[in-house]
Image: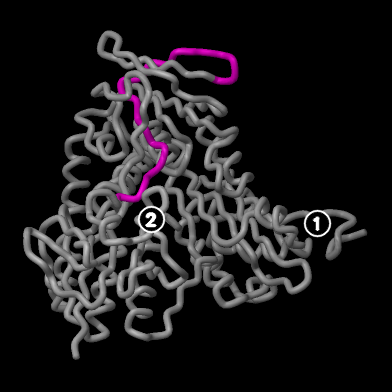
Amino acid sequence: MTKRVVVIGGGPGGYVAAIRAAQLGAAVTVIEQEKLGGTCLNVGCIPTKTLLHTAELYRTLLKGKTLGLQMDNLRIDWTALQNRKKNLVTRLVKGVDSLLKANEVTVIAGKASLTKTAGVEVNGESLPADIIILAVGSEPVKLSFPGSDLPGVIDSTEVLSLPDIPKSLVIIGGGVIGVEFAALFSSVGTEVTVVELASEILSVTDKELAVKLRQELSRRGVTFRTGASVEAVEANKGMYCARVLTGDKVETIDGEYILAAVGRRPRSAGIGLEAAGVAMERGRVIVDQHFATNLPGIYAVGDCNGSVMLAHAASAQGVAAVEHAFGETAAYCAGTIPSCIYTTPEVASVGYTEEELQRQRISYSTGSFALIANGKALIEEGQSGFVKVLAHSDSGKVLGVHMLGPRATDLIAEGALAIRVGATVDDLITTIHAHPTISEAIGEAALATKNLAIHLPPKRGMKGGPE
């Protein structure tokens, strides 16, 4: 008998789960209340990176003389850039729609909800389902302080479609979302201030990466206030004034807009989950290692389960959930989920950070290679970056890889694969990396765990180097 699968949500978790279910022979229906592709495609990853790409090209071309380029009157056509962003998003949304049609997946526009009997209802009609995949995504966290409801206090969705490039911007939050927008707008001439409650930006990232990125963005004109909070915002002569508390010091910072970028939360309210008996905790759906909820046949993938709020994690979870539901051997390796930040320089990490290894008292060795010694990085003006490899002291197995520099978000796949297959630093060392490429730095960082890096002076007194 053909299984009937209903997927609630057409984002990267939902549409990928739907396609995998169709591949396994199911009759699949996807219900989406907005646009296919979800947050990532429509108001997240894709539009943000489109704007970041142009902003970084602009910043690079402004210093064209050092690159052997001569140009005059370079400017950003903000309207044309916004149109490019819209066109790219539309093209990719149509691509998702075409993929679903090619796999004979039915798409219904509407808001779905679970019934008290754990069925699915949409547009006033009930849908039969043997398996239900919840892939309802997330939404920006809303802050509440005096003035938080003013029109100039915007979120990460609204900032993508500003009518003009702002002259100044105060960003509340120094996480991934906050620093990407800081990089974007500082590159196009906006005066940017980032206010972060923690003592350092990117609090869950490898600390060395976070510190170095903050230093790089500071050199580009971004002002950081760490250990600080926005207490209130007031409107003042067409501007917005943020009252910022840092320790015992209070200061006011003006911005044309105040961007609240303090993260996202599961979009789980109002779809009948509690009434149906789905176990929840502070808005997130509780799942097991197979992404199954406490109710038979109901799974929750992606941002709504709150485990890892990344598009590629959602897609992998969608596949794993469907395969488990169909009795297949599902493989989901949480330890190989890369984290990528599309600033310049780019930041990418996979596996353990040094801080995590220290907390868990795992013995490890560190190899770090500065990109100032990498020819391709110099060509691409990425000499301030580095690659760091963390390996188990006894087995030599790769435990973590962390990168700051050009193409880091692409190169991190090598680190993810190394961890996935249980590779050692010797495997990285004996893998021949093409020259000239930035990927050479991965092999050099692996060598550096043994103090054997070819293009770095050896550290005296360490194993592998001169005594």
Q: Secondary structure at mark 2?
A: strand
| Extreme residue in the top direction | 237
Whether residue 189 is visible here, answered yes or no, is: no
Q: Is residue 220 above or below residue 235?
A: below
Q: Any mark on residue 280, and which?
A: 2
Q: Main secondary structure of the magenta part?
A: strand
User: What range of the chain is rendered magenta?
Assistant: 246-267
Name the side, left or right, on which 81 lies relative to 49: left
Image location of residue 79, percent across then percent down = 17, 35
**Tag 1 residue:** 458
The residue positioned farthest toward the left in the image shown:
124
Instruction: Look at 51% across and 27% down and name the residue there.
Output: 224
User: Residue 52 placed where, x, y %?
Assistant: 35, 43
Q: Residue at x 51, y 45 (%)?
A: 381
Residue type indicated by callout 1: Pro
Between the residue at mark 1 and the residue at mark 2, the CA separation in whole angstroms equals 53 Å
User: On residue 33, which mark appears?
Assistant: none
Q: Place residue 388 in its image quadrant.
A: bottom right
**Mark 2 residue type:** Met
